[in-house]
Structures are given as structure tokens and as C-alpha cells.
Image (cartoon, grey):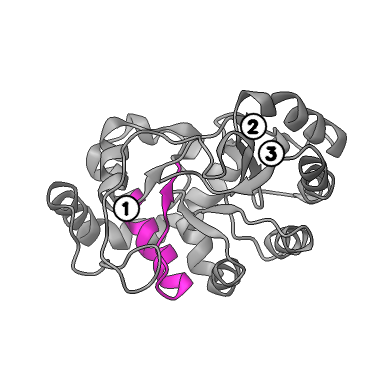
């Protein structure tokens, strides 16, 4: 999620995550710091597909699409949400589009059935931290480790063993340390080119116009499926996805 306008949602998630964070911090912070040095973890040794070893990826923030110059990456942040995620899955399925879902750890933990639905539909998972703290870049390395690695664990457990393939810092609050840690766990740092502004609920027409206007600047488009009423986003996707196909774009995933 972009930094703008996110304080209300951030405070709700922080409150929900407080108990998890307090319980996990003592054990996970030290494990996380060890992982950052060794690149290994005894409890998280599967790749993005079940059964493989963790393979480090590039630390640079990716924006490009694996479909090339005419590729578009649909990315959806902050869920899963029991109201809006199923509706977005329906729209994506209707148009045969695969997306990358950047999930908040506590949301994934609360709705494992939805995480499994996302995976079963062929979409990819992305670690969006435990509690969506957009000031992570101002916090200690120990805190960053806890937020990234605990969310990785929550999402992997909720999915039934499928690990996130990317890490998107809340509000883009990356640090060199967080990028290196995520990459060591096989999660490519993921940015965006087009902020649809859907989080501000400006109206469906405005969301569509923003995407159409800004898409020439890059292929990775940011939407949200949680944090409030996302009906405008659902309707915008119904218009944007067929429009993109008409313009000759192909839907892909961020390169790794």
C-alpha cells in the first residue's frame, strides 16, 4: 500500500497484531537475526512452491513484468478480506487474469481459507509484513526482521505450505536491510509503478482514469482488497481488465 491515507487501516491492523507481535517477538527476533546472517531457517525451508529449497533472489526492487514490454502486473494489497477478496477473485477468474496478492500476516492468519483460494486459483503470494507499519524504515533491524519473517511464516502456514514469492514494504518503507533479508528468503522486493489511488475511494471513474493515465510509466499496478469498502476497486477491475486486453497487454507476474 502507498503511504498516503493509510493511518486508519494501519491503526486497526496494528491493534489486531499487537498480541501476535508481543508473543512472537521474543522467539522470532533472534531467529530472524540469525536468518539474516545465515540465510536459513529450520522452520521455513520450502520455496514458493511446496517441497523446494529456499533460493535467494535479487535485492533490487522489481517493477518489470515477466511478460515483457507489453506485460502488466496486477497487485492487490492488505488482505485477504472475507468480503472483498472473494469478489476480486471472481473478477480475475472472469477475465482469466492472474495477480499477486500482498498479504498482511494477521489477515492471512485470520483467513487461511482465503489464502488457500488465492493459491488454488494460480495467483502468487507476497509478504506485506505482520502489521502494515508504514514507518518500518524508521525502526530497528530486529523489528524489521520480526515483521517480515513472522508474516512469511503466517502466510506460509495459512496457505498450506506455499511461501510468498515477493516482499512489499508497507507504504514502500524499504531499507537496505529489509530488502537483503527478504531476498535471502526468496522474496523479491516488490515496488509499483501505478498507484490506482483506490485506497482513497475517489470513485470508480477516477480509479480507472488513473490507471489508464499512468500505465505508460510502468507495468505494476497497485490495488487493495482490504482496509475498508473496496467496492470501487471491484468495479474498476471489471472495466480495467478488459480494457487492458483490448489494448494488447498481457497479464504477468513481477520478475524474480
On the image, the x and y values in percent for residue 205 come to 87, 34
The alpha-carbon separation of the residues under discs 2 and 1 comes to: 25 Å
**Residue 210's image quarter?**
top right
Number of other residues with Cα within 10 Å of mark 1, as a class: few under 14, some 14 to 19, many 20 or more:
many
On the image, the x and y values in percent for residue 19 come to 40, 60
**Does the stretch in magenta take in 161?**
yes
Instruction: Check disc 2 and report the residue beneath it.
Output: 195
Q: Nearer the viewer, residue 87 or 226?
A: 87
Number of other residues with Cα within 10 Å of mark 2, as a class: few under 14, some 14 to 19, many 20 or more:
some
Q: Of label 2 and label 1, which has the lower sequence position? A: 1
> Above or below — where is 5 with respect to 30?
above
Q: Nearer the viewer, mark 1 or mark 3?
A: 1
Q: Nearer the viewer, mark 2 or mark 3?
A: 2
Q: Which mark is residue 186?
A: 1
Q: Residue at x 55, y 34 (%)?
A: 192
Q: Of label 1 and label 3, which has the lower sequence position? A: 1
* The magenta segment: 148-168
Q: Answer whether residue 202 is visible to the viewer in this image.
A: no
Q: Nearer the viewer, mark 2 or mark 1?
A: 1
Q: Answer whether residue 92 is visible to the viewer in this image.
A: yes
Q: Nearer the viewer, residue 80 or 208?
A: 208
Indicate the secondary structure of the residue bearing disc 1.
loop
The alpha-carbon separation of the residues under discs 2 and 3 comes to: 9 Å
Indicate the secondary structure of the residue bearing disc 3.
helix
**Residue 44's image quarter?**
bottom left
Instruction: Check disc 3 and report the residue beneath it.
Output: 199
Q: Nearer the viewer, residue 254 or 230?
A: 254
Q: Nearer the viewer, residue 57 or 104?
A: 57
Q: Is residue 137 left or right of residue 8?
A: left
Q: Is residue 36 left or right of residue 205?
A: left
Amino acid at each position: 500500500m502507498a503511504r498516503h491515507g493509510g493511518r486508519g487501516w494501519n491503526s486497526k491492523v496494528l491493534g489486531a497484531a499487537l498480541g501476535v507481535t508481543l508473543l512472537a517477538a521474543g522467539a522470532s527476533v533472534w531467529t530472524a537475526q540469525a536468518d539474516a546472517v545465515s540465510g536459513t531457517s529450520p522452520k521455513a525451508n520450502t520455496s514458493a512452491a511446496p517441497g523446494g529449497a529456499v533460493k535467494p533472489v535479487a535485492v533490487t526492487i522489481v517493477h518489470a513484468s515477466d511478460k515483457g514490454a507489453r506485460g502488466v502486473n496486477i497487485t492487490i494489497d492488505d488482505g485477504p478480506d472475507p468480503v472483498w477478496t472473494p469478489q476480486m477473485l471472481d473478477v480475475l477468474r472472469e477475465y482469466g487474469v492472474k495477480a499477486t496478492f500482498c498479504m498482511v500476516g494477521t489477515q492471512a492468519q485470520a483467513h487461511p481459507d482465503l489464502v488457500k483460494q488465492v493459491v488454488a486459483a494460480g495467483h502468487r503470494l507476497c509478504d506485506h509484513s505482520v502489521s502494515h507499519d508504514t514507518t518500518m524504515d524508521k525502526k530497528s533491524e530486529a523489528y524489521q526482521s520480526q515483521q517480515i519473517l513472522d508474516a512469511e511464516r503466517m502466510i506460509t502456514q495459512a496457505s498450506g505450505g506455499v511461501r510468498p514469492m515477493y516482499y512489499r514494504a508497507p507504504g514502500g518503507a524499504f531499507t537496505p536491510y529489509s530488502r537483503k533479508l527478504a531476498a535471502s528468503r526468496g522474496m523479491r522486493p516488490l515496488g509499483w509503478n501505478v498507484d490506482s489511488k483506490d485506497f482513497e475511494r475517489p470513485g470508480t471513474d477516477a480509479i480507472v482514469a488513473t490507471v489508464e493515465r499512468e500505465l505508460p510509466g510502468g507495468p505494476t499496478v497497485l490495488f487493495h482488497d482490504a482496509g475498508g469498502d473496496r467496492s470501487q476497486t471491484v468495479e474498476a477491475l471489471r472495466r480495467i481488465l478488459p480494457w487492458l486486453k483490448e489494448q494488447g497487454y498481457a497479464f504477468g507476474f513481477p520478475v524474480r
